[in-house]
């Protein structure tokens, strides 16, 4: 299984292709992901991890190129700050904000009926999870499973005061080509 750690920073994964803009120890390929196309062939990877990078860039062209280099039935795992996260607005390098429904626009024939926006589509969403800070915020141990029970509970959370009362940390989405 061929795996790509896109925008890896210092989170180097053994057995993966680690790509980052910075020439850090363990980085296999130094490349700015905004310089497209990415330096890979079509349908080259089975799994691509995009952890904490898409919020820093104009991500739609990058997502399209990820689609190109991902094998059929391959998975892209995306981790970005949720729009209610203190990290979302606290970092001045963040350009984009994400909700649980953001990536539905890249799936053909989803409930939002807006897949016509783009000329590429993933086949399905494998997972959507809104993650919460843990540690001393003990109530989040109870909030997270309730919010992630299904799409309706995630929508209810985001559309009401609950998202302000219990701000999330991270959105994790897995898309299958």
Image: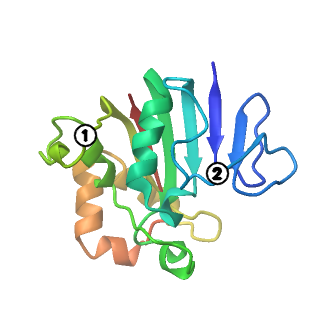
Q: Is there a contact, CB below 8 Å, between mark 2 and mark 1?
A: no
Q: Secondary structure at mark 1?
A: loop
Q: Viewed as shown, does residue 96 lie left or right of 109?
A: right
Q: Position of residue 14 (x, y in %)?
A: 79, 33
Horizontal side of residue 169 vs 29, given as left or right = left
**In front: 84, or 26?**
26
Q: Position of residue 171 (x, y in %)?
A: 45, 55
The CA distance from mark 2 to mark 1 is 24 Å
Q: Which mark is residue 162?
A: none
- Identified at 23% across, 72% down, the residue is 160
Residue depicted at 21% across the width and 51% down the height: 152
Height in image: 89 above or below 38? below
**Residue with the mark numbered 2:** 7
Quarter where residue 24 is shown = bottom right
| Crowdedness near tag 2: few (<14), some (14–19) or many (≥20) residues, C-alpha within 10 Å | many
Q: How many marks?
A: 2
Q: Earlier in the sequence, mark 2 or mark 1?
A: 2
Closer to us: 99 or 27 = 27
| Residue 19 drawn at (x, y percent) | 69, 44
- Left or right of 123? Residue 18 is right
Q: Which residue is mark 1?
A: 119
Quadrant containing the C terminus is: top left
Tell me the residue at 81%/54% (across/down).
23
Label 2: element kind:
loop
Res 120 → quadrant: top left
Which quadrant, please, contains the N terminus?
A: top right
- Identify whether 54 is placed above or below 6: below
Q: Nearest to the eye among marks 2 and 1: give it.
A: 1
Q: Position of residue 99 (x, y in %)?
A: 34, 60
How packed mark 1 is, by other alpha carbons closer than 10 Å (few <14, some 14-19, many 20 or more), is: few
Q: Residue furthest right?
A: 25
Q: Residue at x 56, y 66 (%)?
A: 138
């Amino acid at each position: 299984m061929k795996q790509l750690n896109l925008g890896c920073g210092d989170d180097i994964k053994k057995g993966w292709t680690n790509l980052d803009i910075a020439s850090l120890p363990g980085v296999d390929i130094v490349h700015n992901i905004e310089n497209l196309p990415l330096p890979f062939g079509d349908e080259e990877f089975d799994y691509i991890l995009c952890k904490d990078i898409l919020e820093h860039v104009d991500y739609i062209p990058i997502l399209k190129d990820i689609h190109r280099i991902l094998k059929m039935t391959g998975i892209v795992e995306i981790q970005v700050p949720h729009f209610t996260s203190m990290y979302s607005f606290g970092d001045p390098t963040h350009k984009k904000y994400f909700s649980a429904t953001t990536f539905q626009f890249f799936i053909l024939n989803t409930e939002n009926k807006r897949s016509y926006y783009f000329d590429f589509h993933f086949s399905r969403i494998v997972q959507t999870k809104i993650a919460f800070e843990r540690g001393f915020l003990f109530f989040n141990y109870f909030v997270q499973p309730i919010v992630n029970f299904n799409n309706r509970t995630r929508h209810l959370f985001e559309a009401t005061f609950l998202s302000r009362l219990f701000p999330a940390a991270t959105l994790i989405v897995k898309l299958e080509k």
